Image (cartoon, rainbow, N blue to C red):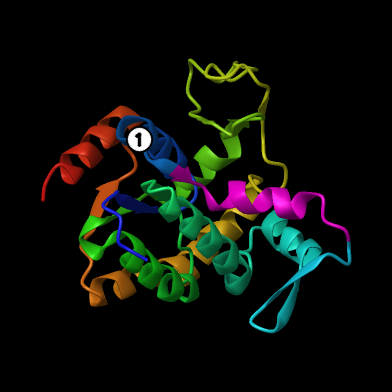
Amino acid sequence: MRKYKSKVIIIIGPPGSGKGTQATLLADRLGLFYFETSRIIEPKIMGARPYDYVIIEGRKYYLKEEKKKWESGELWSPPFVTYWVQEKIKELAEKEEGIVFAGSPRTLYEAERIMPLLNKLYGKKNIKIILFTLSAKTSIFRNSHRRICELLRHPILYNEETKNLTKCPLDGSKLIRRKKLDDPETIKIRIKEYKERTLPIIDYFKKKGYKVKKISAAPPPAVIFRKILNYLSKP
């Protein structure tokens, strides 16, 4: 396959760091596909029956088991995630669409298999990686107050102006909380999973010659967005 010149932006960060918000803004501004792994995989597992499974690398992965992991705050099985992510990447590359990833890849296993595919299809020079930093305290607060819209899953920032909203200002659908996933105790597990299983991929990126831009996720989204655009404008 030929390499496409479209951009690939990868945003890595702890839960509640605003990955989804920034990915949405970047997708709109730059005409990229917002690749939210959970949005791609959740529909496949939410209505799964006990005996539904997929076979990956000779092993069965039961969808019900993956759903339980997701609801408890654990990461999905890396081969399970990688399979669906690779399939979607190939589909987007064929359409010559650029991509902005929010929180993917999430494990070293995924990175070691997804990055070579992205290099092949898009070219290493077109891949930009951004690392958000955020304290655990802020992460827990943001996640426990977070809501998304029921239709298109827009993340809604929690503040004095939005805390009483019941419908998404972008598409009018009902605002919902992700039950179990955004409970404080579950968030603590997600933060632990992030530190132990996701952060190590930053070293992998650096060893492979990728530049990783570190940005604090504490400021307002508009400030962070300007910093990202400024970084992306540089060669």
| Residue 103 location (% of width, % of height) | 45, 54
Looking at the image, which residue sits at the far left? 235
Quadrant in the rendering for residue 34: top left
Q: Residue furthest front?
A: 1
Closer-to-camera residue (33/183): 33
Left or right of 229, for residue 21: right
Q: Position of residue 214 (x, y in %)?
A: 25, 54
Question: What span is colored magenta in the figure?
Answer: 34-49
Please state if 33 lies on the left or on the right of 48 as rendered. Answer: left
**Who is closer to the viewer here, 146 or 91?**
91
Task: Relative to 223, say whether 166 is above or below.
Answer: above
Q: Residue at x 63, y 65 (%)?
A: 76
- Taking 69 as reference, is 134 above or below it? above
- Say which residue appears at 28% left-offset and 36% top-offset: 224
Q: Residue 216's spot in the image, x, y percent? A: 29, 46
Residue type at the position of mark 1: Gly
- Residue visible at 23% across and 66% down in the picture: 210
User: Regarding mark 1 in the picture, which secondary structure is present there?
Assistant: loop
> Magenta region's main secondary structure?
helix
* Residue 25 belongs to magenta span: no
Mark yes or no: residue 229 visible: yes
Query: Residue drawn at (68%, 22%), measured in percent from left and top?
Result: 174
Relative image position of residue 204 (x, y in whole percent): 32, 75
Q: Is residue 132 visible?
A: no
Residue on which disc 1 sits: 31
Instruction: Name the residue furthest right.
Output: 50
Other-residue count near label 1 (Cα within 10 Å), few / some / many at <14 / 14–19 / ≥20: some
